[in-house]
Image (cartoon, rainbow, N blue to C red):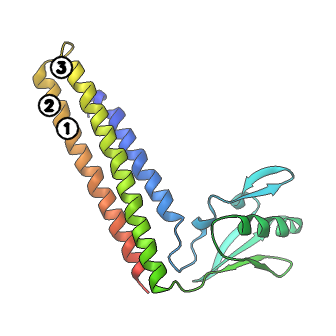
Amino acid sequence: MDERLKVYDEKMQKAIDFLASDFASIRAGRANPHVLDKIKVDYYGTPTPIQSVGNISVPEPRMIQIAPWEKSLIKEIEKAIMMSDVGITPSNDGNVVRIVFPELTEERRKDLVKDIKKKGEENKVVVRNARRDGNDAFKKLGKGEISEDEAKQLADELQKLTDKYIKTIDQMVEEKSKEILTV
C-alpha cells in the first residue's frame, strides 16, 4: 500500500475499532462482561476500571458476577454500577456483586437496533470524511508534486479502501442487529 494512503487507512480502521468497542458495550439480553468496560470504581480515591478491582465472570447466560479482590470494595463497585448507564441494579451477598439482566422487550430490541444503525451511520461518516481529506490532499499534490494521473490513481485506491470499510461497517451493523433481535 502507498505510504500516502496509510494515514487514511489508519483513520478508517480507527472508526471500525471504535464501532466494535461501542457494539461490545451494548447489551443484547445476554450477559456480556464488556458492558462494564467503561465503568470506573473509586479505588482509594483513584478512578479504576472495574476489571482491575475484581474477577468478572458469567456464571449464567443472563448474569455477571464480580468477585472483588478486596471485600471492602463491594459497596464501591455497586455504587459505580448504579451511577453508570448500564441501567441495572446490582445485588451482593457480602462476597460478590451480581448483575442479573432481564429479558429485553420487543420494543427495547427495536430501539437498540435503531441505535446500532445510527452508530453505524456515524462511523460511515468518519470513513467518508477520511476519504474527503485524502482526496483533497491528493488534488493538492496533483498540482505540482505528482502527476495528475498519479493523483487520480491514489484517489481510486482511496475509494477502494472506503468501499471496503463501509462494507465492513454494514456487516457489523447487520450482525449486531441480528444478535439483538434473536430472542
Q: Residue at x 79, y 76 (%)?
A: 96
Asked whether the beta carbons under mark 2 and mark 3 sit within 8 Å of each other, the answer is no
Quickly name the residue at label 2. Answer: 153
Q: Position of residue 45 (x, y in %)?
A: 85, 50
Query: Mark 3 falls on what kind of element?
Result: helix
Mark closer to the observer (2, 3):
3
Q: Mark 2 or mark 3: which comes first in sequence?
A: 3
Residue 142 circle label: 3
Residue type for callout 3 = Gly
Residue 67 at x, y percent in the picture: 77, 71
Q: Quadrant of residue 92?
A: bottom right
Q: Is residue 135 above or below residue 65?
A: above
Say the numbered circle drawn on residue 157: 1
| Horizontal side of residue 166 vs 41, given as left or right | left
Amino acid at the residue labelled 1: Glu
Quote the CA–CA distance across marks 2 and 3: 11 Å
Q: Secondary structure at mark 1?
A: helix
Residues 113 and 45: in front is 113
Q: Is residue 105 above or below residue 139?
A: below
Side of 102 relative to 114 (left or right): right
Q: Quadrant of the C terminus?
A: bottom left
Furthest-left residue in this view: 149
